[in-house]
Image (tube, coloured by chain):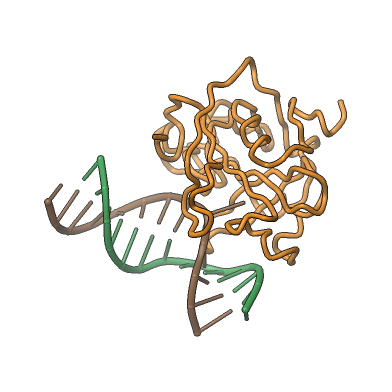
Chain colours: A orange, B green, C brown
Amino acid sequence: MTQKQLAGIDWDADSPIVARQLIGVTVLIDGVGGRIVETEAYDGEDPASHSFAGPTQRNIAMFGPPAHAYVYLSHGIHWCLNLVCREAGHGAGVLIRALAPDVGVDQMIARRGTPDLRNLCSGPGKLGQAIAVTRALNGLPLDAPPFTLIAAQGTADVVTGQRIGISKAVDQPWRFGLAGSPYVSRPFR
DNA sequence: CTTAGGATCGCCT
DNA sequence: GGCGATCCTAAGC
C-alpha cells in the first residue's frame, strides 16, 4: 500500500475533502484509540489556520508531506492532533476533534480520570490526553508506529457545520461529524 | 441548559 | 506582552 492510499484516503485532496473522508477511519497511537467521529479542515489560504501566515518553527509540519502528523499545544494545556494533506507546501491539514473510544478503553479512562465514555475523546484536547498525543509525534508519518490507521467500514453518514473556537473565517462550513454520534464534542445543528 | 472566567505556556509581534 | 483550532467548574435562568 502506498502512503497516498493509506486508510483509503486521498491524501492529496483539499482538506475539506480529506476531513470528510476521515470520518469513520480508525486512528490508534500505540494501539489505543478509535473511530474518528469529528474533524475540522484547515488550509494555507484559510485565515483561521495556523499555516495562514506561512511556515514557522511551530507549524512547519503542516508544510511537509501529506499523511503525516502535525501536533500543537493549545492554551498551554492541551496537545491536539492534525493530519497533514494536499502536497507539501500548502499548509493544509485536518484537526481530529473527537473519536469513538474503541480500543484500549481502560487506558483512556486511566489517562482521563473519568469512566464516562462520552467524556474520553469528545474534543481535541481530551482526545489528545486519552491517546497520549505529545510533541514527539509532530511530523511523524501515519503509516508507521506508533500510529495505526484503519480504513472506514462502509459509508459514513456525514454532517457538516461551523468550526469551533476560532475568530476568523467563521462562516466556512469546514466542520464534519458522524451523524447521530454521541461522541462528538458538541452537537451539530 | 447557557454563560462566564480561570488555568497555563509556547509562539509570534 | 498578548493571545489562542480548549477544558472544567460554578453560577444563573
Q: In this view, does A65 lie above or below A177?
A: below
Left-right relation of A122 to A131: left
Rendering coords of residue A101 (x, y %): 52, 30
Rendering coords of residue C9 (x, y %): 29, 54
Total residue callouts:
0
User: Which residue appears farthest toward the front when viewing the image?
Assistant: A171
Front one among A31 and A19:
A19
Residue drawn at (47%, 54%) of the image: A165
Front one among A125 and A21:
A21
Left-right relation of A30 to A183: right
Rendering coords of residue A67 (x, y %): 77, 40
User: Which residue appears farthest toward the right when viewing the image?
Assistant: A2
Q: Quadrant of the N terminus of chain A?
A: top right
Rendering coords of residue A62 (x, y %): 73, 53
Which quadrant holds residue C11? bottom left
Q: In which quarter of the image is the C terminus of chain A?
A: top left
Residue drawn at (50%, 46%) of the image: A163
